[in-house]
Image (cartoon, grey):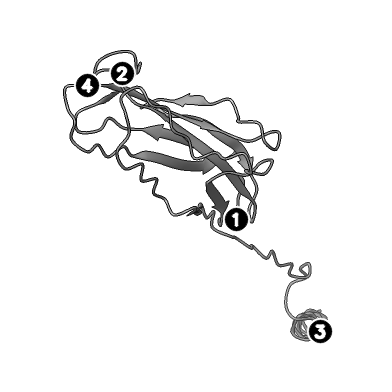
Amino acid sequence: MKRIAVVLTILLLLGMAFSGGSARADDQTITITVTIQSLALTLGGGGNWDLGIITLGATPTTWTASTPVDGGQFTLANDGNVNQDLTISVADSANWAVGDPANQDEFAVGYGVTATLGVEPAYTNITTGGVALTTALAPTTSFSFDLQLKVPTVTTSYAQQSIVATVSGSPSP
C-alpha cells in the first residue's frame, strides 16, 4: 500500500513538473497609449495695430472692403491637438477705461468676422471679463477676425494709450 502511495506521489510530482506547475490560463496584456492634451495658439497678422494720431470719437477698424469672407486682419491658428474654445478680453489702458465711449475717458473694442465680401461686419463688444470669440476650433484650423476701436468722445488725457486685447484658449467640452 505504501508502495502504491509512493508511486502515485512520484507520478503526480512528475506530471506537475512537465505541465509547468499548477494549471493556469494564458497571460493577456493590456497596452495603454496616452497623448497629453496640448493647447497652443499662434497669432498671425502681426499682433499690433498702430493707429497713430486719431481724433476724439473716431471709430477705426482693421476691416477693409477687400477683406475676404471669414477673413480678417488677425488670424488665430490652433496648433494644439484638441478642439479649443477661444475667448477675447480687453484691459483698461493707462488713462482710459473699457466702457461707453460717450463717457469721458472710456473706450470700447469690438471684434467682427466678415460674412459677405465688401460688407463690414457687425462688431461684438469685448469686455474686461472676456467674450466668446469662437468655439470648437479644430486642430490645424484657424479663425480670422477684425477689430474696431471706439475712442472716447471726451478725454482728460491726450497721452498715447496702449490697449491690450488677450485671446485665451480652453479645451472644448
Is 7 rendered above or below residue 143? below
- Which mark identifies residue 32? none
- Which mark identifies residue 11? 3
Using the numbered discs, state the Cα–Cα distance from disc 4 to disc 2 in whole angstroms: 7 Å
Residue situated in front as seen by the camera: 150 or 94: 150
Using the numbered discs, state the Cα–Cα distance from disc 2 to disc 1 in whole angstroms: 45 Å
First in sequence: mark 4 vs mark 3 = 3
Type of the residue with mark 1: Asn
* 1 vs 3, front mark: 1
> Residue 106 location in percent, x, y?
29, 20
First in sequence: mark 1 vs mark 3 = 3
Type of the residue with mark 3: Leu
Residue sitting at x 44%, y 33%: 60
- Quickly name the residue at label 1: 81
Using the numbered discs, state the Cα–Cα distance from disc 4 to disc 1 in whole angstroms: 45 Å
**Cβ atoms under marks 4 and 2 closer than 8 Å:** no
Type of the residue with mark 4: Thr
- Quickly name the residue at label 4: 155
Is 89 rendered above or below residue 152? below
First in sequence: mark 2 vs mark 3 = 3
> Residue 18 location in percent, x, y?
79, 86
- Quickly name the residue at label 2: 153
The reply to whether residue 134 is in sight is yes
Using the numbered discs, state the Cα–Cα distance from disc 1 to disc 3 in whole angstroms: 62 Å
Mark 3 neighbour density, 10 Å: few (under 14) some (14–19) many (20 or more): few
Mark 2 neighbour density, 10 Å: few (under 14) some (14–19) many (20 or more): some
Type of the residue with mark 2: Thr
Element type where label 3 sits in the image: helix
